[in-house]
Every structure is written in structure tokens, then in C-alpha cells.
Image (cartoon, rainbow, N blue to C red):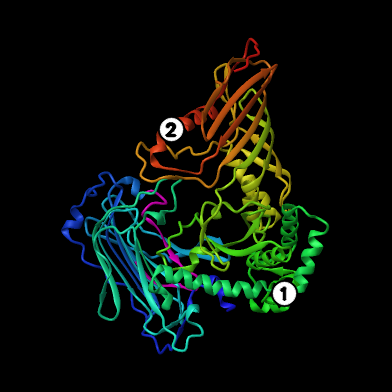
Amino acid sequence: MRGFRLWLAIPGFLLMAVGSLPAMQSPEPWLPITPQDWQIKDVPMNPGAPAIQLYLSYYQDDNDAFISIYKRVKILTEAATRPGEYADVEIPIEDRASLKQLLARTVHPDGSIAELKEKPFEKIAYKRRGVKETVRAFKFPEVTVGSILEYSCIISLPRRVVSPISALPVQSTLFTLKERLRFRAFQGFVEVPTEWGHLIPKSQVSYTYLNQVNTRVPQKKQGNLMELELENVPAFAPEPDMPPESDYKPTILFYYGGRESASPDKFWNEWQKLIREYVEKFVGNSSAVREAAVQAVGSETDPEKKLRKLYARAQQIRNLSYERGRSLEEQKAEHLKENSSAQDVLQHGYGTGWDIDALFVALARSAGFEASMVGISDRQDMTFKQIVLWLGQLDGRGALVNLNGKNVLLDPGTRFCPYGLLRWQHTAATALSFAPGGDFISTPDPESSQARRTAKINVATDGSAKGEIAIELLAQEALTHRLDALKTDEAGRRKSLEEEVQSWLPEGSVVKMVDSQGWETVDAPLTARFTVELPHFAATTGKRLLVPSFLFPTPFKQTFDSSVRLYPYAFSYPFAESDQVTLILPDGFSMEVPPFRRKAGLSYASYEISSSLDGNTLVTKRSLRFDGFRFEQDKRPELKGFFDIVHAGDGGQAVLQTSGAGDKTN
């Protein structure tokens, strides 16, 4: 059963009894452009939209190993021609797939055609958890208002393997007049882990249609083809700080499975049993692990302190999940062996995050605690749905321990994760316990994360400024920065922090990091100091200087701009910010108008900013606490009212004049 962890890591299931596969198809030929297409000037149900999707064809064929895409879009406004809009196209390419053929052209209302001549180039969309997702990007030529843009392409999929789950895109950000979605499963036997060991193994394909857009559902056509044809599909309008789009966006999911796919209950019960058996065998009951637990605990008798010591011991294991991936040849050269038990993890001194969590469970059990492994969903990517028969929804993991009669969820397998903290993606999420008789549970709500920032800035008479900034990050903020830093070297880490601070400041500012500490610790703050030069800090108007009294970023600046909210608000985690900005004002200036003091409060949030002047030194102190992380749409007026005050306070200015003097507090 070593395939359980591999099943989550590999991109697909193996195909069995594969014969010769048909040749890959060519891109779909251009469809005729009708007079009705040219007459469209606006979008039904969405007047003023910048563009309309006239046609979408998406066909995934796992049997012949290709995806065929055909898109046709008409440009309706000047805004749609801007860089980064509809003239710029990115085609996602999954791991081990490749773009084999691409045709693209711009058709103008006068009938002239501009063909794409440039080759598409590769871009990395994101790289996370060892999975790299790339896109092939290109730009349509000669795009103007009224143009019709269309492309047709073939993506070659890896042979002899299929993805455990595939999605057909039903809805885009554009209103779509007509679309045709098709999926053909592999026609042979697909080897799935739940069927291993059966005398007559079976595999089947199931589908789930989430957030159905109308009454039509996929129909089975000749050749085991599933097809859905739709007309007048409304556009999907995402909003800032909303839950995962997959919670609301219509999507058709196809996945391979065995007998367990008969129902959601059977699926999750079967997998819970299968994984539980593997976990129990891996954790084992090793004398070496028991001895390690005794040594870690020492003479400690307090249960929580004992558990903390065991947690720290587990985190001493070298965590391979946060190192670059290695080929089999590199693993052999480094003498890295696969762990098949908690004892192996202990004796080898290295392992994946999963291995380390499992070792912690073994240590906790050896010390007399009731402990088990859990699989955890990721609320950043999608909210767990029991009707979706895909184990990949539980790609996080942790250890559930009974401490003084209460269950605590811990994750020593996440590097730098302090005792009692979970990564925010795994908080307020669904988890499945792999204990005997285990069931679904809810993980704890996220804890508040703290940030402290200070700045001391000398302001010149011409409005420029120089000074220092110091930051101190704790909890989620510190953990996120530490994990991100593992993806780069020291120079990259420095550059990343400098760019982050630079994004807070006026354009043209120069930021240099002086030092930083706390990158390799678990419980201590992460700190950094910077020198800054701000050539355009204050505005000069005649004999006056308009000086910003606050220097740091304000959260949720665009979140509440729209007068209508369609979806709930979802934030990563609660937070608290404590800031102080000290401005040394130029000689010969006095305060004419001080920054306004602002204060606001809700049951779950508070804000206060105030300034005081002592001679030529203006000190602004600011505190912001926000305890919530999810709110329904009807909370918009309350949230907007609170953050309107925050935005106004953070945008406060001091007005200085060249004559007179005064000490004012406000």
C-alpha cells in the first residue's frame, strides 16, 4: 500500500492493456463568421461589457491523449484592446503535456485577416508543492474594436497515464453565445489504488456537475463520448476577497475510480479504511520510537509540555518536502532511502512532511497519548465537497492528539510551523480522521497574526525623505514568509523583502535591506531592517508641504468599492497591526494643519490612529485589529463603514508652512 502517498503526488493513474493509439487530431478548422456575429455591438444581459465570447469548443480525449480548444471572441470596446486583456492569451499546459499545434488570427470587419506569425512562449504560472504549472502565451496581432479573435489548438497529453480528475470549463469571464464541451474517457482498464488486490479489478468514470448553469447535463454520445452543448452562458464576475471561485463557478468534473465510486459515502469510507490501514502499519509500535519518546520527554510530567517536547523532536527531522525535488539518480547519489515506517524516519533522520507527522503520531502514542493522522482540505483552492469523489481534496495533513480530554490538531510536518498553529489554508476547513472509526471533522478557526512596524523618516524641504523601516512578523505572517523564502537563496530572499517594502512606498522609492533575523526559527519573530529613500514623499504647494503621516499599506482598498456584493467575503486569517511612524520635519517649517485623529470599532474590529508633535518631530501611532475571516454579503455596509474610516485615517496628511510654530496633538 505504499501507493497511498504516491497517489497524491503523481499526476495520474496508469493505463492497462493499451494498444496502439490513434494519431493526434489537427486543430479544428475555422468556422464561418456569420452576418449576425458582425452585427453584435453589445452583450445580452451585460451591456457595456468589453468583449463577448462567440464560441467555445473544449474537447478532452483521454483515449487518444489530447485536448482540443477552439475560442472565438469579439472585441466591443477600446478597453478590451489594452495590454493584458483579450489580445493576450495564456493556454494552461499541465505537467508532461505539450502544445503541439496552434492557429490564431485576427479578423477585421472589412474582411482582412492578420494571422499569428510569432511562436507562443512559455511562462510559469505558479510553482507550488513540487508541481509546476506552465502556460503558452501569445498576443493576437492588429487588434481593434470590432475585431474577431480566434484560436484553435491541440494539447498533447502524456501517454499511458490519465489524470485522476479532469475539469471541463463551463463558464468564463465573458458572456458566451455558444459552447460545446466534450470528454472521452480512456476505453481500457485504469489501474486505481482502491482496486489493488481484487481478483477481478474494475475501473469506471464518474462525473459531477457543480453549480449547474441550467437544466442541461452531459449526454452520452456514440463512441462513449460525453457532450454538453450550451447557449447564452452568463459571464462569471469574480470579486476581490471572495471564497474560492470553484465554490460558485459551474464546472464538470470527471474522475476515474473503482467500486468505491458507487456513492460519496462508499467512496470516503473505502478510502478512510484504506489509508487507516496504511497509517497504522507505517506508525507501528517500534522500541526505537518508544526510546526516542522517553528521551525527548525526559522528566517532564505536564501533558502539554510533554507534547511540546515530542513536537520539537519530530521537527528536528530533515524535512525533504521543503527542499527541491530530486531525480532517482540524485537520491541514489545522496543515499536517500524511502521510509516505510516511523522507525525508518527516526533512524534515517529525514523524511517528507507526511513522514514527520506520522513519526510525531508514533512518538505521541509511545508517550501515552491517543493520536492519529488526518487528511485536511485546502480552503485556498477549493472548499471541500463530499460529493466530489477525489482524494486530492485532502492534500494537507496533520496529527490529531487527545490532550487532557480535548483534541488538538498539530502539524510538525510543515517546516517552521509552531506548536498549536496550522497554515491558514488548513484552518476552518474539512478534515478526515484516519483513526479507527474516524469521520469528517472541522479544523479550528485561524488564529490572529501580528505585525509590528516602525519607521523613522527625515523629511527635506523639497519633499524628499530618507530614513529607516523595521518590521517584526509573528504567527501566520512569519510562517508564510519563511516558507516562501525556502524557494530561493539569500539574495532572492533579500530581493523579495525589499520589493515588498518598496510596494508600500511612493513610486521611485529605493529600499535596501540592512539585516534580517529569525528565518530558521519556529517560535521567535521574523525581523528585518531597511534603509529607504523617498524622492517623492511630500508634495510642495507654494510655501507649504503636504506630508503623509502614515507610511505602511492599508488592507482591502478595493474590496468594498462595488455597491453590490454577489459573494461572501473570505479573508485568509484575522490580524493585528501595530505601527509607529516618526517624521523629522525640515527646519523652518511649522504645523499648519495636523493629521486628523480617527477611531472606529466593531465587535470584531478596532482601529485608532493619532499624531503628536514635539518640536519638529511628528509621531503617528496606529493600531488595527480585525478578528473575522468570513462574512456574508449583508455585512458589506458595516465592513465598508469601518474600512472607510481606516482608509481615510491611513491617508491622513500633515500640512506644514514655512513660518510660525506650534505643538499640536490630534
Percent position of residue 574, x then y = 56, 42
Q: Quadrant of the C terminus?
A: top right
Residue drawn at point x = 55 percent, y = 31 percent: 606
Q: Compare residues 25 and 434 and report the one nearer the observer.
A: 434
Q: Amino acid at mark 2?
A: Glu
Q: Position of residue 438 (x, y in %)?
A: 54, 65
Q: Assign a secondary structure to mark 2.
A: helix
Residue identifier under label 2 = 638
Residue visible at 20% across and 52% down in the picture = 40
Span highlighted in magenta in the image: 82-103
Ranked by sequence position, the earlier of labels 2 and 1 is 1
| Label 2 crowd (10 A; few <14 / some 14-19 / many >=20) | few
Q: Nearer the viewer, residue 139 or 479?
A: 479
Which residue is depicted at the point 71% across and 43% down? 528
Q: Is residue 286 above or below residue 422?
A: below
- Which of the pair 38/628 is nearer the observer? 628
When the figure is inspected, residue 665 is found, relative to residue 115, above or below; the finding is above
* Left or right position of 433 against 234: right
Outermost left residue: 35
Residue at disc 1, secondary structure: helix
Look at the image and tell me whether residue 156 can be seen. no
Snapshot quadrant of residue 31: bottom left
607 w.r.t. 246: above or below: above
User: In the image shown, does 358 or 182 lie closer to the viewer?
Assistant: 358
- Give the quadrant of residue 47: top left
Mark 1 lies on residue: 344
The circle drawn on residue 87 is: none
User: In the drawing, does residue 307 fall left or right of residue 72?
Assistant: right
